[in-house]
Amino acid sequence: MVLVDALLGEPTPKLTLPHKIQLSYPGREWFVRPYSPSNPWWTMLLAALPAIVTLKGIFVDQHITVVIINRKENKLKKGFGYHLDLTVATICIVVCSLFGLPWQVAATVPSIAHVKSLKIKSKCTAVGEKQVVVGCREQRLTLLIIGILNGCSFFMWPILTVCNGVIRNLF
């Protein structure tokens, strides 16, 4: 789509990347205060209902993901680690809420795809017979690498800026 945008030559809005970590709005503080003179006390009560609904949604999403992944057919041995994952997700949501950052929640489809990709299937089956799952390569390295690469994307702004300029000059 970037190439189509460049080929059309239309002045579409582009994402401007900051050169350093800074607030997007200069009048805002890093920490989001639940109560301040500009934020009356009753707004906390008003925000409680959507917060409870959102909390239930996140809990249900996480629980559905855990139930699907911990099925007996996946033959996981370390299934209880997902309770730790829920605790870590909860802590991250609280911290992100205090700083006004987006939440990280369970990603059901990628999690299921990840488990399917790590399944060990039997190699000797009869013609037309379905392969049997004999185990699962359990590791946390993939998610760690994904997290590190997501964090490193902040430092890619010079590369993205240069690429954007090169594509613009080509077309």
Image: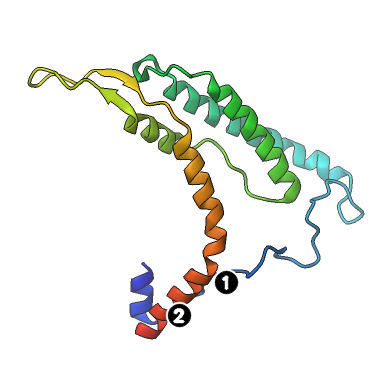
Q: Nearer the viewer, residue 169 or 4?
A: 169
Q: CA distance from mark 1 to mark 2?
A: 13 Å
Label 1, on which residue? 16
Q: Position of residue 166 (x, y in %)?
A: 41, 80
* Quadrant location of the N terminus in the rendered image: bottom left
Note whether residue 105 is visible.
Answer: yes
Q: Are the residues tagged 1 and 2 within 8 Å (C-beta)?
A: no
Q: Quadrant of residue 117?
A: top left
Specify few, some or many for label 1: CA neighbours under 10 Å numbering under 14, 14-19, or 20 or more: few
Q: Report the residue at 66% width, 39% height from top.
A: 92
Q: Residue furthest right?
A: 37
The residue depicted at 48 percent of the width and 45 percent of the height is 146
Disc 2 marks which amino acid?
Gly
Q: Residue furthest top?
A: 72
Q: Which mark is residue 63?
A: none
Type of the residue with mark 1: Thr
- Near mark 2 (Cα within 10 A), the count class, few <14, some 14-19 or many ≥20, is few
- Which label is found at residue 165? 2
Q: Is residue 10 above or below residue 19?
A: below
Residue depicted at x 18% and y 22%: 123
Q: Which badge, 1 or 2, comes first in the chain's sequence?
A: 1
Image side of residue 3 versus residue 156, left or right: left
Residue drawn at 29 percent across, 24 percent down: 120
On the picture, is 111 further left or further right than 128?
right
Q: Position of residue 49 (x, y in %)?
A: 72, 36
Q: Secondary structure at mark 2?
A: helix
Looking at the image, is 134 positioned above or below residue 43?
above
Q: Secondary structure at mark 1?
A: loop
| x, y percent for residue 16 | 57, 71
Report the quarter where the C terminus lies: bottom left
Q: Which residue extends farthest left?
A: 127
